[in-house]
Image (cartoon, rainbow, N blue to C red):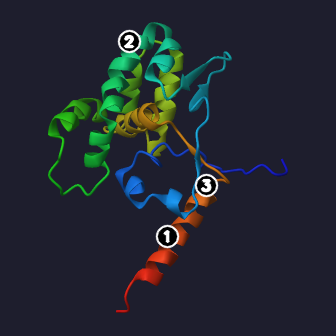
Amino acid sequence: MPGLIHDHCSAFHPLGVGSPFWQEIDLQRYGLTWKWPQTDCAHPLDDGSAGVLFQSIEKTAARMGPDASRWRRAVGDLAAGFDDLASDLLRPVINVPRHPLRLAAFGPRAALPATVMARWFRTEQARALFGGAAAHVYTRLDRPLTASLGLMILASGHRYGWPVAQGGSGSITRALARLCRLSAAESPPA
């Protein structure tokens, strides 16, 4: 379609705003503009329904029917404490955790295979939404720890939403390039 930017496999950035690293370098100062959709994510099903993610955990849970309370229990505390969780999980592993209780709460769910975590839900909509998020690990979902990424990006979605970069994902690269060029210009000679 003319004029439409096609970002294959790179349209939404659930950690683009919530990652401590991305927050620190603040690419908005280098021309990046984030845009938030009304519906952050949807995983359609053959019957025409869908598992739908909104930034509001309550709005998401309201569409889960009998899985509403399970969704809140699975993701709610992770979303509420996302900044603490991200500050420990999205940094080098050899550091001492700053929020060990938050990590301890995340650990048992994160250690599960995504297929096991998905069976915790009763509805196909909740399973599809969780499974679609977990599939971003790009490996078999029956392996240990595959629930971790799904939980993380869903929690990020409830905390920050799933924004898109205005002008396409290449805008992130262009903002990073501006940052690098300006940083090189400001660095003293070696």
- Residue 169 marker: 3
Q: Quick one: quadrant of the C terminus?
A: bottom left
Position of residue 177 relative to residue 105, above or below, is below
Q: Residue furthest bottom?
A: 190
| SS at circle 3 | loop
Amino acid carrying label 1: it is Leu
Question: In this orientation, does residue 16 appear?
Answer: yes
The label nearer to you, 3 versus 1, is: 1
Question: In this orientation, does residue 141 appear?
Answer: no
Structural distance between the alpha carbons of marks 1 and 2: 43 Å
Position of residue 60 relative to residue 149, above or below, is above
Looking at the picture, how far across and down is residue 184, in whole percent? Answer: 45, 81
Left or right: 172 with respect to 1? left
Structural distance between the alpha carbons of marks 3 and 2: 35 Å
Position of residue 166 relative to residue 109, above or below, is below
Circle 1 residues within 10 Å: few <14, some 14–19, many ≥20 = some
Residue marked by disc 1:
179
Which one is earlier in the sequence, the residue at label 1 or at label 2? 2
Residue 158 placement: quadrant:
top left
Residue marked by disc 2:
69
Looking at the picture, how far across and down is residue 162, in whole percent? Answer: 52, 39
Which one is earlier in the sequence, the residue at label 3 or at label 2? 2
Amino acid carrying label 2: it is Ser
Left or right: 163 with respect to 151? right
- Residue at 78% across, 49% down: 4
Amino acid carrying label 3: it is Ser
| SS at circle 2 | helix
Circle 2 residues within 10 Å: few <14, some 14–19, many ≥20 = some
